Image (spheres, rainbow, N blue to C red):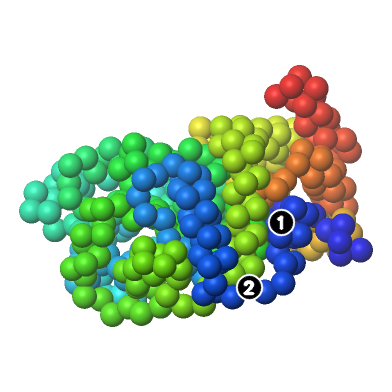
Amino acid sequence: MREKQYLMIPGPTPVPPRILRALSIPAIGHRSPQFAEIMKDVTARLKNIFETENDVLILTSSGTGAMEAAVCNFVNAGDKVLVMENGNFGERWVKLNKRYGADVEIIAGPWGEPHNPQALKARIDADKEHQIKAVFVTHNETSTGVVNDIKALREAVGDHPALFIVDSVSGMAVSPLKIDEWKLDVVATGSQKAFMIPPGLAFISVSPRAWAICEKVTTPRFYFDLRAAKKAYTEKFNTPYTPATNLIVALQESLKMMEEEGLPSIWARHEKYKTLVRAAIKELGLEPLAGDEAASGAVTAIKKPGNIDVKKISKLMREKHNIIIAAGQGKLETEIFRIGHLGYVHVNDIIVTIAALEMTLKELGMDIVLGRGVAAVLNLLVKGE
Ligand SMILES: *Cc1c(COP(=O)(O)O)cnc(C)c1O
C-alpha cells in the first residue's frame, strides 16, 4: 500500500496529482522554441513567488547546488565571511565557505532558538574597515523548526557593504520573505519543499549589487557559474546545460497552483498547520523544541519524550501506520523527531499523523489518553482556526 503513504517530512514533500500529470508528458527538446517559451513563463512566475525584480535563475540540482552557487559566485578564497549558525543548515554554510577557502567567522546560536540580531549588529558595527564580504543566514532552519527573523537580521547589517545571502530552501512560500523590500542580495531555494515538485531543481535570486561582485570574483566555477546561467537565459530563454525539462514543466504547473492559491493564503495555511501540530503535541505532554515566537510553519521539531528512542517512533510510524516522519539532524539526531508540514499538505494529513503518533507513543510505553491530541486539532478546526 505504498500509494497511501503519508510523507510528513520537511522535504521531499507530497506531489499533487495535477503536478504528477504534468510530469508525465513526453520528453521535449531543451533547445526547442516550445521549451524557451516554458522557461520564459516559468521564470516570470517564479519571480512573482520570490516577490522580486532581481534575476531568478533555475539550476538543475538539489537545494545545496544553489547554496554552492551562492558561495562560489560571490566569495573569493581568503574573504572574510560571517555565518549565522543555529542548526544543521547553518553548518552547511560554514562547510561550503570553508571548502572554498573563505575566512569563516561563525556567530553560533543555540539550536532551537532564533538568532539574536543584536549579536550580528555588534559584529557588523565593529567592522569599521569593511573586512566582512558576505553574511550568510538561514531563513527556516529545518533541522530545529525555527524561523530566523530575516528582516531584523538584514536591518542589523544596515549600510555595511557585505552581501546578504539567504538559504530559504524550506522557508520560501512558507513564510514571508521580502527580497526587494528587505534588500536580500542572494536567496537560494529548492523544488522539493514548498514548491511541491520532486527534488532536482534549485532556484536562486541575485541582486544587481551581487552581480557586480560576481563579475569580480575569481573563484573557479563551471556548472554553477551564474553568469553562464544568466547569459543563456537573457540571450535564448534557456540554460547553459541540459536542464531537468520535465521538472521545469512540473514547476510551471506548481507555480500556477501557487498563484491560484495566492501567497498570503499559502502562508496562512502553513501557520495553521504549525498551530494544529503544536496544540496536539502539547496536549499529549510533548515539548516542541522551538518556542512559540519563532516556530516554523514548515516543520515542527519535538523533544524526545522521556527515554523513548526517537528512531523507534519513526520506525513504528512508518511500519505500522505508513507515515514517514523525520529524525533529528546533526547534534540533535537522537534528541528530537520532526513532523514536516509544508507544501501539498492537508489538515486531514495532520489529523492522521497525530492519531498515529498517539498510538505509537502508547505502544512505546507513554501514558497517552488516546484521542487527546486529535481532539486538540479538531477543536481548533471547528473554531475555524
Ligand atoms: C532541504 C534544505 C536544503 C537543501 O537540501 P538539498 O538536500 O540539497 O535539497 C538546504 N537548506 C535547508 C534549510 C533545507 O531545508
Helix, strand or loop at disc 1? helix
The percent position of residue 210, horizontal first and vertical second, equals 26, 57
In-image side of 150 versus 282 (left or right): left
At horizontal 12% and vertical 54% (from top left) the residue drawn is 130
Q: Which mark, by number, is residue 355?
A: none
Which residue does the numbered mark 2 point to in the structure image?
28
Q: Sort mark 1 into few (<14), some (14-19) or many (20+) by Cα contacts within 10 Å.
A: many
The correct choice, above or below, for 236 with respect to 242 in the image is above
Cα distance in 3D space between marks 1 and 2: 17 Å
333 and 293: which one is in front?
293
Q: Sort mark 2 into few (<14), some (14-19) or many (20+) by Cα contacts within 10 Å.
A: few
At horizontal 23% and vertical 53% (from top left) the residue drawn is 209
Looking at the image, can residue 62 be seen? no
The percent position of residue 205, horizontal first and vertical second, equals 39, 55
Q: Which mark, by number, is residue 19?
A: 1
At horizontal 71% and vertical 56% (from top left) the residue drawn is 19
